[in-house]
């Protein structure tokens, strides 16, 4: 090309080149993360799917983060064992292992499977606690046989044999446990730990148990004042010692909450936080509107879930939020503006974190989630992505979405009776002002599909190197002017839910 012609060509296309460069830089900025794999499934029993890890929870205290998750997922509930991964240096390096003494696959446990891991720290007794749901194979299927607590007294690096919270009896079938501890030295109940769960065998009855000795012994479980039917509670403790439990009703048609003001001696009636408007994810993915809840240093509680009330025709879910200072009066539901209302994307399975050194209008929130870029899809066409978004003003505004993973095809994921699975929940925790989401990511198995008896699944636990948070001066978005649209209520399916 003649030099003059080349110059004219460059000048003519310079604006287009600049636009292209801007688009590419924006895309890269939204995906400029380095993932760190923190564990993988080592089990080989042919009755479950390997290598699969799903359903992480996390908790942080000081410079330590502990994550826990299922390893070796069974098709009809539970896993070969519960895994753990611990960082004692603010997320820089990780040590991982598996809980001994629960299942027959590790440490001579007596149970056939285990599910629903959740982690907490008890500052008074300097002990980390992992709650899990032990399962037994019975003629009718799989029984929620016991809620257990495993303890670590060395910063989450080794774990004890399990201590029983409760063992199922008289037709009980336990499900969806969660754990929290009172870490406020000024609280009259400092050092109390609380485990919530439900009894599917008795219409999903809400149950709560308290420990005052670092998780070694637990009180007889008691229900709420209205004996409500529930699933998926996440208890939180305010600085004054009040315990607030955001939770779904047993049909996942409402988010509700209840509380204790006397150290777990009694539990109030439930109150409604909001009705749930839920879109069913395409491709048969296992998901649902279970809540994810956290608390700031002032005792303000934040709860999020997947909800379609802002989308015409309930065509896709957003992540929505409500808050409370007293556990009784909840704010109107607001939308987290991950993208526009006309994007066509679907968002679900949130994992919320709140920096406990911040509060109220200055509270720092970090939210991990999964999404489909296109809500309308099938098992073979859906593409699953993990994402993250953050706020430094208590959720009034949010920074731009960050993409965490490349697209995952659903057949790469563990298969279950309720669909392909990354987890009924995921989790995020803050350390040193940075948010560390932990989530399942997957790569294609050599056989092309993950299923029972396979040993070539590639679904494992990951976090983000260095953590994530909104940069100073970063542009933010608000959904303050978004309004719910008239959509039909979620169908009143007369089936109580269980997720194991």
Image (cartoon, helix red, strand yellow):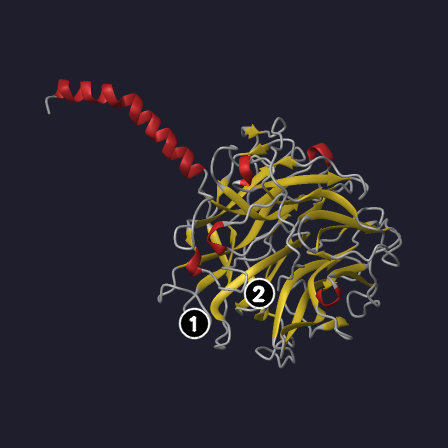
Residues packed near mark 1 inside 10 Å, few (<14), some (14 to 19) or many (20 plus): many
Is label 2 in a helix, a strand or a loop?
A: strand
79 left or right of 441 in image: right
- Indicate the quadrant where residue 9 lies: top left
Residue 151 appears in view: no
Write the residue at 42% across / 60% down. 411
Residue found 48% across the figure and 47% down from its top: 404
Q: List x then y, in percent, for residue 165.
A: 76, 69
Q: Are marks 2 and 1 in contact (CB under 8 Å)?
A: no
* Residue hosting label 1: 455
- Helix, strand or loop at disc 1? loop
Question: Residue 441, percent across and down?
Answer: 47, 56
Is disc 2 surrounded by few (<14), some (14 to 19) or many (20+) residues within 10 Å?
A: many
- Residue 211's x, y, as percent? 81, 64
**Could you tell me which residue is drawn at 45 percent across and 74 percent down?**
453
Please tell me which residue lies in front, 382 or 50: 382
Name the image quarter holding residue 174.
Answer: bottom right
Give 158 or 444, whichever is nearer the viewer.
444
Q: Position of residue 51 (x, y in %)?
A: 47, 67
Estimate the spatial distance between the alpha carbons at disc 2 and disc 1, rounded to whole Å: 16 Å
In the picture of the structure, the residue carrying the numbered disc 2 is: 70
């Amino acid at each position: 090309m003649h030099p003059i012609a080349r110059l004219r060509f460059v000048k003519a296309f310079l604006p287009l080149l600049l636009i292209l460069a801007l688009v590419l830089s924006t895309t890269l900025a939204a995906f400029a993360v380095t993932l760190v794999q923190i564990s993988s499934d080592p089990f080989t029993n042919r009755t479950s799917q390997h290598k699969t890890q799903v359903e992480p929870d996390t908790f942080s205290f000081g410079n330590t983060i502990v994550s826990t998750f299922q390893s070796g997922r069974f098709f009809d509930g539970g896993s070969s064992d519960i895994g753990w991964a611990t960082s004692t240096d603010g997320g820089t390096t990780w040590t991982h292992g598996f809980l001994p003494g629960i299942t027959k696959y590790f440490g001579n446990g007596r149970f056939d499977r285990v599910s629903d891991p959740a982690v907490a720290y008890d500052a008074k007794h300097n002990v980390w606690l992992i709650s899990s749901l032990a399962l037994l194979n019975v003629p009718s299927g799989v029984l929620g046989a016991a809620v257990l607590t495993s303890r670590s007294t060395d910063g989450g690096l080794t774990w004890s044999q399990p201590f029983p919270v409760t063992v199922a009896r008289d037709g009980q079938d336990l499900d969806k446990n969660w754990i929290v501890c009172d870490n406020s030295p000024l609280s009259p109940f400092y050092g109390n730990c609380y485990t919530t769960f439900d009894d599917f065998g008795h219409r999903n009855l809400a149950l709560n148990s308290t420990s005052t000795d670092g998780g070694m012994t637990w009180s007889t479980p008691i229900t709420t004042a209205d004996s409500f039917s529930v699933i998926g509670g996440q208890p939180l403790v305010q600085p004054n010692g009040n315990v607030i439990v955001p939770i779904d009703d047993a049909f996942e048609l409402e988010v509700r909450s209840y509380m204790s003001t006397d150290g777990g001696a009694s539990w109030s009636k439930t109150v409604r936080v909001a009705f749930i408007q839920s879109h069913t994810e395409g491709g048969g993915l296992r998901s649902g509107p279970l809540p994810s809840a956290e608390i700031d240093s002032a005792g303000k509680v934040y709860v999020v879930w997947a909800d379609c009330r802002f989308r015409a025709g309930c065509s896709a879910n957003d992540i929505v939020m409500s808050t409370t200072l007293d556990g009784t009066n909840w704010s109107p539901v607001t939308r987290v503006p991950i993208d526009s209302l006309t994007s066509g994307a679907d968002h679900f399975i949130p994992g919320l974190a709140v920096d406990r050194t911040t509060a109220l209008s200055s509270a720092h929130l970090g939210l991990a989630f999964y999404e489909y870029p296109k809500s309308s899809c099938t098992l073979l066409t859906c593409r699953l992505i993990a994402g993250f978004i953050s706020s430094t003003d208590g959720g009034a505004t949010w920074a731009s979405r960050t993409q965490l993973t490349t697209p995952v095809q659903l057949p790469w994921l563990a298969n279950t009776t309720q669909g392909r699975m990354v987890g009924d929940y995921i989790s995020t925790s803050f350390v040193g002002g940075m948010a560390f989401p932990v989530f399942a990511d997957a790569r294609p198995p050599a056989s092309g599909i993950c299923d029972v008896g396979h040993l070539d699944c590639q679904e494992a636990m990951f976090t983000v190197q260095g953590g994530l948070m909104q940069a100073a001066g970063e542009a933010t978005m608000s959904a303050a002017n978004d309004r719910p649209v008239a959509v039909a209520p979620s169908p009143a399916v007369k089936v109580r839910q269980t997720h194991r």
